[in-house]
Image (spheres, helix red, strand yellow):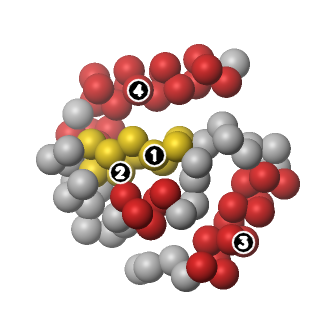
Amino acid sequence: AEVGEDEAEEMRAGFVSRGLGDALLGIVGDRDGFVTPEELRALVPHVQVFRGAGHLPSLERPAEFNRLLLDFVARWT
């Protein structure tokens, strides 16, 4: 389901109020049938698109996913 602009703004405000701000990473496959990269970019500041992956890049490409996640977390800790 598509997230409307009002819902997206409410979600972004919630992230900021919880102190998350820039420390959010969205990961999406370009073949995801549930959320598009554009929809995710409207919600979080950092988005990584896995080419050829569907809704679960963590299962489809675990090594690449884990490396990306660990690198991102290391930047914020």
Q: What is the secondary structure assignment of the residue under circle 2? A: strand
Residue name at image x 66 percent, y 81 percent: 6
Position of residue 11 measured from the top left corner of the image (x, y, whole percent): 68, 66
User: How many angstroms separate mark 3 from mark 4 (CA)?
Assistant: 27 Å
Q: Relative to 23, is 17 on the left or the right?
A: right
Q: Is residue 56 visible?
A: no
Q: Nearer the viewer, mark 1 or mark 2?
A: 1
Comes first in the chain, label 3 or label 1: 3
User: Residue at label 1?
Assistant: 47
Count of numbered circles on the image: 4
Q: Is there CB contact under 8 Å for labels 3 and 4?
A: no
Quarter of the image that includes the N terminus: bottom left
Q: Is residue 13 visible?
A: yes
Q: What is the secondary structure assignment of the residue under circle 1? A: strand
Position of residue 7 measured from the top left corner of the image (x, y, whole percent): 64, 77
The disc labelled 3 sits on which kind of residue? Glu
User: How many angstroms separate mark 1 from mark 2 (CA)?
Assistant: 8 Å
The disc labelled 2 sits on which kind of residue? Val
User: Residue at label 3?
Assistant: 10
User: How many angstroms separate mark 2 from mark 3 (CA)?
Assistant: 21 Å
User: Residue at label 4?
Assistant: 68
The answer to whether residue 29 is above or below residue 22 is below
Q: Nearer the viewer, mark 1 or mark 4?
A: 1
Position of residue 34 measured from the top left corner of the image (x, y, whole percent): 33, 69
Q: Quadrant of residue 39?
A: bottom left
